[in-house]
């Protein structure tokens, strides 16, 4: 071989090698993107007793997803940001986390006030919000609120189901006429949300509705319960959160108001709300956002085996399966399954952008078979969303505290869409007009 030919052959070989390296090396050097789930939490402050178990359940489920191999092979990551339940801190956390780790997949504010603020930011940032069991009730209308997903329930649905339950207890809606129902509520966007529905039902059935706001954080309620003792309502609805709930029960004991005449929303019906009151809370009832305490659920047993038994649990092992732990766990499951639904359209085993994930949340189809396979048999009913329905399910049950544990005390109940849907549409249209939004077209719903 001549020197010139040898040089040419060597150069060609180096060129081929460099081309191969340029193709292969980056693929080997760059690991697959992880699906990032930012987590707004409150592990400190007045609401920590309720915020901590939710956050632990959320994080443990993400750990379980990775133990299962990820979302069709895509690993998940997360980062917590402490809000203290304050709206301004929640917005700061959102701004800090939304662009990290390749971009946030979805935010779950765990605060109606933070939800109100982020509802205006999400469309511009193209990041979905899951507000499972809280947030703006009218955001169930996906044709206006493209980025909001109040999965499984809203406060209008909760208020409606509670009134349905009281009517059944009295022997019919006609028996509510003249009854006195008092709403004790957290004086915040959260506490005010059920008022329009309760006013609507009061006008329909003739019961007398009294509204008693309680200032943050809810530890001072003596004047509230003196009013209740004077007015002697037939029922008290408790729309509290954090220490406000146990305080309400303690004041009910002190003023002699029967706990079996008290009904809480699903954020006022967990172990931290009643344990300090013990037998004094016996007979108190609350809505369950589908699930209750679920220590025997298959998903709980799997978390104990694959996370806690390996020393990777986020919180105390004893709380796994309790009400708010299950709430956080379920919320994480919704976040993950929306990504899985998006992968069916945009590419299995691929990382999904927030915009792609939004499509997944809008096309969520958690059939009973899927829920059972995920370990949620007996815990939840099917959830199915669409362009027009970002809620996906409207069922709830009542559970009652027996002094030691929560026990289901009602059958499944469903919100009355004949009343709620017109209210949702009217409120969504009003919001759209104020923000100069337009209803989505059929083409937009398919995109």
Image (spheres, helix red, strand yellow):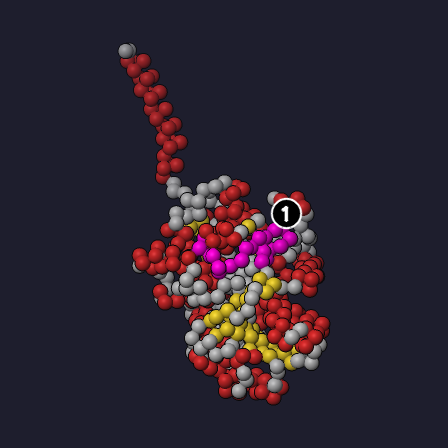
Q: Residue at x 63, y 78 (%)?
A: 181
Q: Is residue 314 left or right of residue 283?
A: left
What residue occupies the far top of the structure in this picture?
A: 2
Between residue 185 and residue 435, name the one nearer to us: 185
Dot 1: within a 10 Å radius of its alpha carbon, few (fewer than 14), some, or many (20 or more) residues?
Answer: some
What residue occupies the far front of the structure in this picture?
A: 171
Q: Quadrant of residue 345?
A: top right
Q: Is residue 93 visible?
A: no
Q: Residue at x 65, y 55 (%)?
A: 144
Q: Is residue 426 left or right of residue 190?
A: right
Q: Quadrant of the N terminus?
A: top left
Q: Residue at x 42, y 75 (%)?
A: 404
Q: Quadrant of the C terminus?
A: top right
Residue 444 belongs to magenta span: no
**Magenta stretch: dominant SS?**
loop
How far from the left and from the top, in percent, is residue 396?
A: 56, 64
Q: Is residue 164 visible?
A: yes
Between residue 202 and residue 18, name the one nearer to us: 202
Stretch of the chain drawn in magenta: 374-393
Q: Quadrant of residue 49?
A: bottom left
Q: Is residue 420 left or right of residue 89?
A: right
How far from the left and from the top, in percent, is residue 77?
A: 41, 52
How far from the left and from the top, in percent, is residue 140?
A: 62, 58
The residue at which mark 1 appears reads as 445
Please say if 103 is above or below 132.
above
Please say if 345 is above or below 230.
above
Residue 383 belongs to magenta span: yes
How far from the left and from the top, in percent, is residue 362?
A: 58, 51
Q: Residue at x 62, y 44 (%)?
A: 446
């Amino acid at each position: 071989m001549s020197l010139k030919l040898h040089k040419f052959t060597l150069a060609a070989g180096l060129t081929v090698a460099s081309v191969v390296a340029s193709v292969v090396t980056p693929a080997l050097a760059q690991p697959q993107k992880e699906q990032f789930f930012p987590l707004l939490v409150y592990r400190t402050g007045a609401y920590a007793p309720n915020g901590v178990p939710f956050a632990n359940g959320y994080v443990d489920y993400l750990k379980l997803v990775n133990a299962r191999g990820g979302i069709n092979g895509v690993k998940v990551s997360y980062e917590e940001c402490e809000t203290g339940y304050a709206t301004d801190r929640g917005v700061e956390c959102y701004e800090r986390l939304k662009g990290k780790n390749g971009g946030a997949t979805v935010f779950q504010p765990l605060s109606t006030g933070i939800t109100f603020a982020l509802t205006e930011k999400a469309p511009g940032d193209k990041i979905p919000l899951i507000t499972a069991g809280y947030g703006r009730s009218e955001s169930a209308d996906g044709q206006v609120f493209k980025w909001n997903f109040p999965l499984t329930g809203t406060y209008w649905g909760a208020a409606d189901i509670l009134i349905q339950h009281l009517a059944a207890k009295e022997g019919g809606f006609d028996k509510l006429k003249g009854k006195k129902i008092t709403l004790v509520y957290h004086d915040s966007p959260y506490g005010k949300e059920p008022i329009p529905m309760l006013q609507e039902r009061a006008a329909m059935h003739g019961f007398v509705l009294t509204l008693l706001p309680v200032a943050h954080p809810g530890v001072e309620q003596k004047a509230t319960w003196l009013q209740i003792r004077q007015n002697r309502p037939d029922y008290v609805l408790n729309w509290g959160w954090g220490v406000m709930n146990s305080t309400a029960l303690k004041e009910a004991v002190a003023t002699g108001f029967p706990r079996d005449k008290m009904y809480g929303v699903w954020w006022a019906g967990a172990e931290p709300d009643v344990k300090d009151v013990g037998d004094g809370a016996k007979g108190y009832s609350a809505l369950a956002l589908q699930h209750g305490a679920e220590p025997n659920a298959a998903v709980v047993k799997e978390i104990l085996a694959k996370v806690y038994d390996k020393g990777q649990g986020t919180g105390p092992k004893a709380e796994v399966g309790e009400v708010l732990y299950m709430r956080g766990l379920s919320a994480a499951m919704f976040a993950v399954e929306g990504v899985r639904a998006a992968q069916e359209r945009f590419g299995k085993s691929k990382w999904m952008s927030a915009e792609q994930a939004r499509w997944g949340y809008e096309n969520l189809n958690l059939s009973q078979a899927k829920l059972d396979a995920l370990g949620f048999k007996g815990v939840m009913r099917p959830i199915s969303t669409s362009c027009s329905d970002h809620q996906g399910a409207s069922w709830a049950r009542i559970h009652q505290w027996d002094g030691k544990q929560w026990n289901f005390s009602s059958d499944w109940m469903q919100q009355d869409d004949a009343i709620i849907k017109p209210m949702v549409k009217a409120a969504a249209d009003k919001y759209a007009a104020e923000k100069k939004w337009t209803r989505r077209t059929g083409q937009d719903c398919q995109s």
